[in-house]
Amino acid sequence: LVNSKRISEQYQKPTEFMDKTISYGTAGFRTKADELDWVMYRMGLLACLRSISQKCQYIGCMITASHNPEEDNGCKLVDPMGDMLHESWESYATRLVNSNNLQDTLKSLCENELKEFIEEFENDQKANRLGRVQRPNIVAAYDTRPSSEALFKAFKTGLEALDGVLVNYGLMTTPQLHYMVRCLNTNSSYGEPNEDGYFDKLTCAFFKIWSMIEFNNNGKYESDLYVDGSNGIGADKIKKLSRLISSVSFNDKPSNGSSQPVLNIHVFNDGKQPSDKLNHLCGADFVKVQQKPPNNLPESSDGKLRKYCSFDGDADRIVYYYLDKSEKNQFYLLDGDKISTLVATHFRELLEGAQLNDKINLCIVQTAYANGSSTNFIENIMKIKASCVPTGVKHLHHEAQKFDIGVYFEANGHGTILLSQKAESIIEERYADLMKKSEELDESVLFNDWIKNDRVRYSLYVLKHLKDCINQTVGDAITDLLVVELIMAMKHMSIADWNQMYTDLPSRQLKVKIKDRNVIRTYDAERRVSQPAELQDKIDNLVKSSEAKMARSFVRPSGTEDVVRVYAEADTQELTDKLAKQVCQLVY
Ligand code: NG1
Ligand code: ZN
């Protein structure tokens, strides 16, 4: 398989990287785009090997640096079910990219760690000589960065060296690509593997629920939503969804004929102005970290409250916010913690309504960055299990998979909802029974009376369609938006009502640059430091001596930037900022 002559001369590792190590971290490989083409070439080789190890199932490659500056880029591989590259392969990625003798490393991988897979593949090839020859299958997509196409070319050259077959999806959001990979490997049982299929599945599920909502004049739900596209790919895709939503005729849906409001999506920071720069002064990361609205916020001129949200550069994160005119434009942020509490509360109500709460368990997964108030609310008021895991979506995703319904969100707005096979089957079976019983009914009676006026039936109906409105492969700003809007609409809730579920503690996130960030070692889901030995005691002392009653602080090395992150929260913003600064001093 690995024929040394086929390794291209074109994408040689630059000499300045010969004694540097870069690793495949939480965000895959990510750095300045002009230092990446040789990395992409090697990732093309690796993607083929991964596909071979998975019986030539489709493996995805997303070219993006998410919320990082436009000049950066990166690459992450996607496993057959649409989840991230299996952890055991991260070290192969790191080894292949750091190798100073690519052919030897490739050969060694194939003859040792991957021996079994390669042999099986080669035997299959021999057995199939007269039939269809199996080749590694890869799909790729990229975000709107100017560097993306050249990096895509390098990746393609790499995979062609190992006879890989490539499907290029072009411009897509990260979660769309994850979705395509899952569809391709499951014979479309998860959906059709193209963009129309993705939008069809979502809009169909969305309207099944939307059309059953009784919008009354007293409800406080705001059907206008202003979306900050971070000047990236999410802007184009949410515009497409918005067009689809507004073009659906209500005659196609089980409605009672009364006029339903439409979800009006208004996109700003769409990257179409010459001065627009990806993620610059806008987007979910900017809004979350700076705790302020993005540039170009379309403020209301009539004093009416507006509901806003921001995506990040590859549209896998979303945060909501609003300005309260009655409080001198006070900014309120509804981050990943608020989203997960809203979603989990609603799922719990639906499970109770469908009388399934003793059959299907529910958990919320968070990280150390979750606001203390949210954890308190989940555990002590909602009485739902809250799990805390290290930063990085793969950790949250794996933890959420341990439950029947796992709701996971990082505070920065990256998250989704996972349903176990068991939960899906129970919901599908009960729903099928329901539909069987209703076969005789006239459609308008069925939806307007039989389902709507019965709590068990209605809860089951919503559970079934809400589940189809979620991208279960990875956090997805677009599907999260639809789920949040449906829940707010069903609850006749304004964004301010949602915000009042609990009050966040003031928080602050800072970064400190030190010589080697990896001298800091953590444990207890990164909430405590084990090395340097005396650092944790010092942090504890600062927290104890703070005047605040609720103070908390922790430090950890970033997995994506060469910095140490410092987090603090306390009763007031002033005490929070003071604590965060003091902890930064300890790290220097
Ligand atoms: P690091 O740089 O390890 O803190 C950041 C985010 C993660 C995750 C990754 C991947 C914070 C504090 N950290 O990781 O949650 O999203 O990027 O993009 O937001
Ligand atoms: Zn992202």
Image (spheres, rainbow, N blue to C red):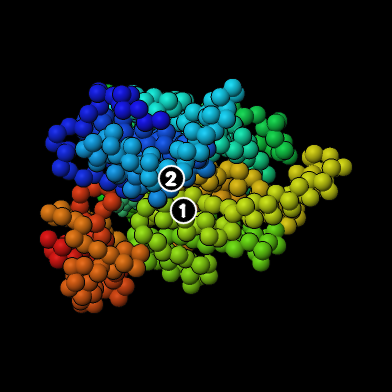
Q: Is mark 2 within 8 Å of ligand 1?
A: no
| Cβ atoms under marks 2 and 1 closer than 8 Å | yes
- Which residue has dot 1 on it? 397
Residue drawn at x 12%, y 54% as measured from the top left: 515
**2 vs 1, front mark:** 2
Residue drawn at x 22%, y 71% as measured from the top left: 536
Q: Residue 93 at x, y = what percent?
A: 33, 42
Q: Amino acid at mark 2?
A: Met
Count of number-bearing discs: 2
Is disc 1 surrounded by few (<14), some (14 to 19) or many (20+) residues within 10 Å?
many
Is disc 2 surrounded by few (<14), some (14 to 19) or many (20+) residues within 10 Å?
many
Q: Is residue 328 left or right of residue 307?
A: left
- Which residue has dot 2 on it? 84
Secondary structure of the residue carrying numbered label 2: loop
Sequence-wise first label, 2 or 1: 2
Q: Is residue 231 above or below residue 542?
A: above
Q: Residue 211 at x, y = what percent?
A: 66, 40
Q: Amino acid at mark 1?
A: His
Return the mark for residue 506: none
Q: Is residue 529 above or below residue 511?
A: below
Q: Residue 20 at x, y = what percent?
A: 17, 43
Residue drawn at x 47%, y 31% as measured from the top left: 136
Q: Is residue 154 above or below residue 508?
A: above
Q: Residue 525 at x, y = what percent?
A: 35, 64
* Residue 286 visible in this rendered orientation of the protein: no
**Camera-nearest residue between 408 and 49:** 49
* Residue 511 visible in this rendered orientation of the protein: yes
Q: Is mark 1 within 8 Å of ligand 1?
A: no
**Camera-nearest residue between 17 and 74:** 17
Q: Is residue 313 left or right of residue 491?
A: left
